[in-house]
Amino acid sequence: MKLGNDSVKNKFDDINNKIDALIAICQTLRSENQDLILQIKRLESDLEKKNQTEEKFSEKEAFIQSKIDALLTKLDSFTVSEETRSKV
């Protein structure tokens, strides 16, 4: 099967157009990939900040709970000693 010059040229033009389209798609995907990488980094940073905030909140909550427990213990001790005194 012999191909004429015009047919060969048309095939090369077709191949060239398809390659150009693939290159354009690759460039678009590369750009979108870079955007997604930046978005992932921002989200990871936001998540880290959220985790740190939650950890600080948990520490404060534990501190407050320990203070409340200490005050309740102190109040219980006072109540027990007052009950003992009133019985005497």
Image (cartoon, grey):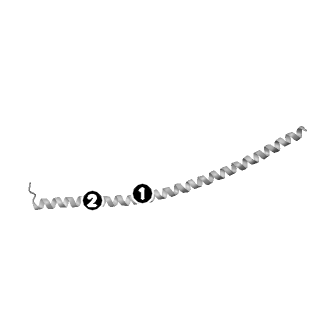
Q: Position of residue 28 (x, y in %)?
A: 34, 59
Residue 35: image x %, image y %?
41, 59
Q: Position of residue 26 (x, y in %)?
A: 32, 59
Q: Image check: 29 left or right of 9?
A: right
Which residue lies most toward the top here? 87
State the quadrant of the N terminus: bottom left
Kindly check if marks 2 and 1 are in contact, taking CB atoms under 8 A apart as contact.
no
Query: What residue do we see at 45% from left, 58% from top?
Result: 39
Q: Amino acid at mark 2?
A: Ala
Q: Tag 2's secondary structure?
A: helix
Q: State the image quarter where residue 22 is shown.
A: bottom left
Q: Which residue corresponds to mark 2? A: 21
Judging from the image, what secondary structure is the residue with disc 1 in? helix
Q: Give the side of residue 43 with respect to residue 9, left or right.
A: right
Q: Is residue 32 above or below residue 69?
A: below
Q: Residue at x 40, y 60 (%)?
A: 34
| Residue 80 image-quadrant placement | top right
What's the residue type where badge 1 is placed?
Answer: Leu
Q: Is residue 83 above or below residue 8?
A: above
